[in-house]
Image (spheres, rainbow, N blue to C red):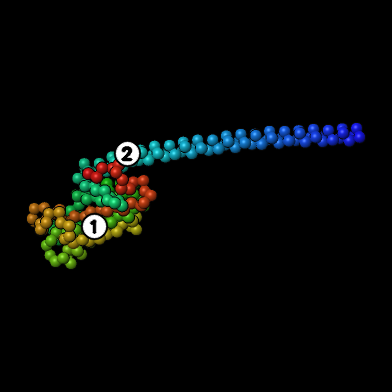
Amino acid sequence: MRGYLRTTGVAVMGMFVVGSTGCLATRGQLRRGLAEQSAALEAERSERLTGDQRLAADLGQLRTDLDGLRREFGTRITMLEDGMQFAVPVHFAFNKADLNAEAEPVLTRFSEVAAKYYPGAKITVEGFADPAGTAEYNRRLSQQRADAVRKYLVQKGLPPQQLAIVGYGEDRQVVPGASGASEGAELNRRVVFVVETPPNSSFGSNGEISSR
């Protein structure tokens, strides 16, 4: 009987020791888990903060570059619902679709801005003509002008699949009725860029960038 009690006591003592050790192990694992979770949350917070700071810096640089297009070249930039419109000072001689040398600096700068900030955007080059000639002829001529600009942008490194063209002919005249050598007619012989930004783009049409 005494032997049984001693044996039972040892068994109970063993169960207590094992149980206590198990509780200690569980508490240790819990502490380690909490510490790991806290470290992961801190790392995520730090990464998010760094990302926000980088985005703020990029937005600041974008504003600077857009302001440069405005100041240096007289580009008019307008916010659209799903992107931006760039009215660049690229004009054409009467009845011509060839780019002139004066157009190259602003087109080069635009290609740099588009490549840096809008790599996933669809860019449509819209061509226009003055009202001299038939509507169909002007539409073809305006499309040729848009195509000439597209080819230049491709030469500057923009992907061909990113660029579309459309010719609007004599529609949307800047100076109504001006054609040929008339004053303001060159403003009708122009191109406009429409940049459609993806929905998840950091540089979409937002109120933080002024429209003029």
Three-letter amino acid code at the position of disc 1: Glu
| 196 up-or-down from 16: above or below | below
- Find disc 1 in the rendering and name its residue: 126
Label 1: how many Cα within 10 Å (few below 14, some 14–19, many 20+): many
**Image height check: is 25 above or below 121?**
above
Residue visible at 17% across and 57% down?
A: 172
Q: Position of residue 134 (x, y in %)?
A: 14, 66
**Horizontally, is 20 left or right of 161 in the view?**
right
The reply to whether residue 127 is in sight is: yes
Across and down, in percent, residue 142 comes to 20, 60
Q: Secondary structure at mark 1?
A: strand
| Residue drawn at (16%, 60%) of the image | 170
Q: Going 53% across and 38% down the picture, which residue do you hit?
A: 40
- Residue 42 in percent (x, y) is at 50, 35
Label whose residue precedes the other's in the sequence (2 or 1):
2
Amino acid type for the residue under numbered disc 2: Gly
